[in-house]
Image (cartoon, rainbow, N blue to C red):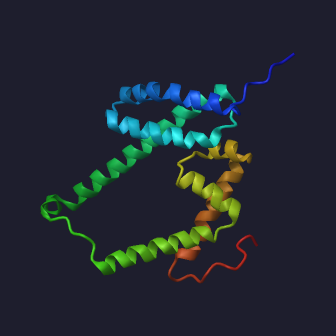
Amino acid sequence: MEIAPQLTTDHEAFERFLGEERQPLVHFLRGHGVLLEDAQDIVQESLHKLTRYREVPLHALKPLLYRIALNTLCDARRRESLSRRTVNVAGPELLELPNEVLRPEQWAEHREELARVRDAIDRLPERCRQVYLLNRIDGLSYSQISADQGISVKAVEKHVSRALTLLRQLLSPSAGPLPQNPNS
């Protein structure tokens, strides 16, 4: 007789797990050279992302939580490295320039561009959009998305690839609008 793994459908068990893992995860990140305040931010974000996995067996939550935290840490370090390179590439004269607030027309341009991108993402087929956002916004790996959505890794790859192709088409100034039904 085989015993099925205990699921975290019990709200209290899930909340207890989150509370018990907060401090050990902070210590784990501190061991990776992360400042205390940054570690606490990463833990908070990771615990929030983990809430989507309430139905995962209890024994699988801890490795998933640590993977989410490491991915979040890698993303933060990548952003930090990119911002340092941008400043270094621009040269020391950039450091002497005063910080300028965007002019109203620049602000409007940025808002318009953001609206265009949001509209383009909204026009993606539902499943394609969902997989794309899990990957690009939530930072989930293809295998994590596969497990979360109940589809193969290959299907995840196809959805992300299709999303990128459709977004390039829609956002390209030379291309026309997407067809009414992008599923065709």
Q: Position of residue 77 (x, y in %)?
A: 37, 44
The residue shown at (66%, 27%) is 58
Q: Position of residue 121 (x, y in %)?
A: 58, 67
Q: Quadrant of residue 2?
A: top right
Left/right placement of residue 15 relative to residue 111 reads right
Q: Position of residue 112 (x, y in %)?
A: 44, 77
Residue 168 visible within the image: no
Q: Quadrant of residue 122?
A: bottom right
* Relative height, residue 21 to residue 177 (above, below): above
The residue shown at (74%, 70%) is 183
* Relative height, residue 11 to residue 97 (above, below): above
Q: Position of residue 104 (x, y in %)?
A: 30, 79
Residue 114 visible within the image: yes
Left/right placement of residue 108 relative to residue 126 reads left
Quadrant for the C terminus, please: bottom right
Quadrant for the N terminus, please: top right
Q: Nearer the viewer, residue 57 or 154?
A: 57
* Relative height, residue 128 to residue 31 (above, below): below
Q: How many marks?
A: 0
Residue ranking furthest to the right:
1
The residue shown at (72%, 30%) is 7
Q: Nearer the viewer, residue 170 or 118?
A: 118
Residue ranking furthest to the front:
12
The residue shown at (33%, 33%) is 36
